Image (tube, grey):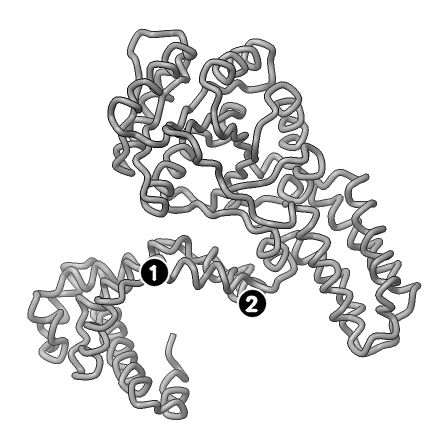
Amino acid sequence: MFDSLSDKLDNALHVLKGHGQITEVNVAETLKEVRRALVEADVNYKIAKDFTKTVKDKALGQDVLNALKPSQLMVKIVKDELAELMGGDAEGINLSGNPSVILMSGLQGSGKTTFSGKLANYLKTKKTKKPLLVACDVYRPAAINQLHVVGEQVGVEVYSEEGNMDPVAIAQSAVTHAKQNGNNVVIIDTAGRLAVDEEMMAEIANIHKAIEPEETLFVVDSMTGQDAVNTAKAFNDRLNFDGVILTKLDGDTRGGAAISIKSVVNKPIKFIGTGEKMEALDVFYPSRMADRILGMGDVVSLVERAQEQYDEEEARKLQKKIAKNKFGFDDFLNQLQQIKKMGSMKDLMGMIPGAGKMLKDVDIDDDAFKGIEAIIHSMTPEERSNPKIINSSRKKRIGKGSGTSVQEVNQLLKQFNQMGKMMKMMQGGGGKKMMQMMKGMK
């Protein structure tokens, strides 16, 4: 996410991070490089120019040159202004209606249908709502089928009318259906086009007028950069939507859309899509995103994701097992599943300050745990609960059953044993010994 922009901004600010004297001249030179980095990330030139002028004015106004730690203060100003450019504060979603109607809009291929499912899953699990997904893309049968598949994935009902080619009538009937069946949120997935055209705009405007949604959201592919911003403006001029959804932020996005879309349409980015999984949806926090762009990580979001998977009762049981040295492979497998639910490994690593930069050229495969899982699943229940009984013949059988080698089985057993000792030390407060144990572990 934003790797190229992060590198260029880091290089631009590197001069000010040294111990040399900081002057108005090298501040100006640094901000020139910052502006260039933003433009190369597909940020509108005028927005990039205004941004660097604001940063320079604030820096001189706060007397950065004579500050005790001028480089740190300068980075803070850049970070604060970057957050402000992206919207300042996080914006919530309006769910005041009964039912609350959410209208999705955007071009074909932007990820509307997938995001509709993610939003339904988010509202169901985190807001304890009972959402209804509505298929109003009557031109592509595949879109209706896709929405039904997505709805089945997240356990949410999908409303569609086979043979009905009137999206306005379908939307109205869906709202009536929701009222009769206790659905308190209605998410309407509309048709997209390959480009903005009058027919599409008229259709979605008619749906909007007929159902009067509490929220109209514009879904945009963040990888399209400045084109996304121009499309958003065209939609907003006609539809006056309430917020923006940025999808595919886990891809090779340059960042231009995320940084400049708020300035152009004056509407907040409300959510971001960070992967293909139905759980890969985050509320957009401008300040946290600014931290990540500047390589500072996002520990708050990382902790929040961990807390979502945290079960207090299960944690107590696990603690007792560790204390009694009864932590087995079934427990380990359960912990792996919890980590996987938190999101892609590369995205999680990017939230740790400094880790994203160190691992930028490392290919972190989301299937990295598959080999481990295969080995554990090839064990008998007795072997999983008591790994000490696994002898050479058992290792051969486990390796053959999991499609791995005896060496890989040995490696997992060794690391599992080391991890058990570390957990035991943590229980007893043996920090120094634990650090020694960590040496050599992968």
Give the image location of residue 164, x and y in percent.
34, 7
Quarter holding residue 244: top right
Position of 343 relative to 440 (above/below): above
**Disc 1 and disc 2 in contact, CB within 8 angstroms:** no
Judge the density around disc 2: few (<14), some (14-19), many (≥20) Cα neighbours within 10 Å. some
Q: Quadrant of the C terminus?
A: bottom left
| Element at label 2 | loop
Position of 342 relative to 130 (above/below): below
Give the image location of residue 359, x and y in percent.
53, 63
| Relative side of 69 to 162, left or right | right
Give the image location of residue 415, x and y in percent.
29, 77
Look at mark 2 in the image and give the residue it sits on.
353
Viewer-side residue, 428 vs 228:
428
Position of 379 relative to 69 (above/below): above
Name the amino acid, label 2. Answer: Pro
User: Can you tell which mark lies on residue 88?
Assistant: none
Q: CA distance from mark 1 to mark 2?
A: 19 Å
Viewer-side residue, 345 vs 149:
149
Q: Residue at x 36, y 13 (%)?
A: 170
| Relative side of 282 to 335, left or right | right
Judge the density around disc 1: few (<14), some (14-19), many (≥20) Cα neighbours within 10 Å. some
Q: Residue at x 36, y 31 (%)?
A: 185
| Relative side of 145 to 57, left or right | left
Look at mark 1 in the image and give the residue it sits on.
339
Q: How many marks?
A: 2
Give the image location of residue 198, x and y in percent.
60, 10
Q: Which one is earlier in the sequence, the residue at label 1 or at label 2? A: 1
| Relative side of 155 to 379, left or right | right
Q: Residue at x 78, y 65 (%)?
A: 74
